[in-house]
Image: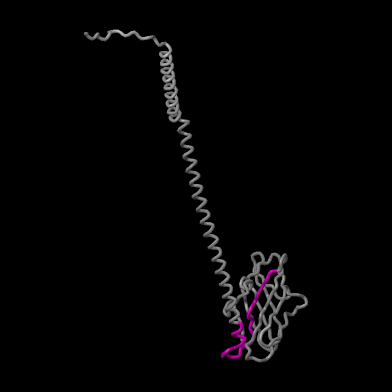
Amino acid sequence: MASRPPPRFVVRTHDAAGQRRRALWLGAAWLLSLVVTALVVGGLVRRATPAAVEKRQIAALAQQNDELQQQVANLQRGEQVSDIATRSLRQTLAEREEEISGLRADLGFYSRLTGGDAQREGLKVQEVRLQPVADSHAWNLTLSLTQNAKRGDDVTGIATVGVEGLRGDKVVQLDWKALGDTSQGDGIPFKFKYFQQLHATIVLPADFRPTRLQITAQPAGDDAVNRTVAWADALSGHLTPTQGEQDAQP
């Protein structure tokens, strides 16, 4: 029996609901594509606007500013550490120099006192110290007198001090009576065999600028011993044997 050829037309049931679903999906996809396109375009437009460019530049500059501030802070901390180390070193050196100066002064004092192989020397103004009296124009004065131990005899006498300085544009000399205590009107008495420290308080006029001290030690029956000392050296308290010294040896 001969086979039947396939039909040229096929009749199918019309699916209206499926077509509507496909149309809805296609519409939704189209709307979604429009939204995505709008967002992308809007983002590109916002990034390309002058305000957006300026905002990005401001953010970049702010970041650079923060980095530079951090670098400056690091440099400042490093400089502070260096300054502290430098000040500490300078203070240490100043203390060592002061200690060495004091040791040299002590060495000179004891060398002169003991005499060694030196000849018998006479009276000497070994040291002069000044200390200010707080809230006044007064100064505490300390004089150290010595003589060589080989002398062996007591030395007695009177010590006086004068101050040279400026009053206005004039050089003025203030003698002991203008400076000293009324109870020591003639001077500071001394009596010793090897050494002695003398103490006194002097008062300067308010408009007087001192520049140097002139110390005179007058031993009984002998020549006076004079020494001129710069005011600043008397404040430091450390004098070398040749620093401002005009000692007359008997």
* Residue 243, percent from left and from top: 58, 77
Colour scheme of the rendered structure: one colour
Is residue 195 in view?
yes
| Residue 2, quarter of the rendered image | top left
Drawn side of residue 206 relative to residue 46, left or right: right
Residue at 54%, 57% in the rendered image: 80
Residue 235 in picture, x, y percent from top left: 64, 71
In the rendered image, the residue lying farthest to the left is: 2
Side of 37 relative to 91 (left or right): left
The answer to whether residue 250 of the structure is visible from this angle is no
Give the residue displayed 71% in from the left and 72% down from the top.
202
Instruction: Give whichever of 201, 21 is nearer the camera.
Output: 21
Q: How many marks?
A: 0
User: Quick one: 160 or 29, which is closer to the camera?
Assistant: 29
| Quadrant in the picture for the N terminus | top left
Q: Residue at x 75, y 75 (%)?
A: 181
Q: Residue furthest right?
A: 183
Does residue 110 show up magenta in the picture?
yes
State left or right for residue 97 relative to residue 160. left
Q: Is residue 68 above or below residue 14?
A: below
Task: Return the x and y of residue 50 as percentages of the image width and height.
Answer: 45, 30
Which residues are drawn in magenta?
109-132
- Residue 93 in picture, x, y percent from top left: 55, 69
Q: Is residue 124 magenta?
A: yes
**Image quadrant of residue 46?**
top left
Front residue (pair 185, 49): 49
Q: Quadrant of the C terminus?
A: bottom right
Closest to the observer, 174 or 187: 187
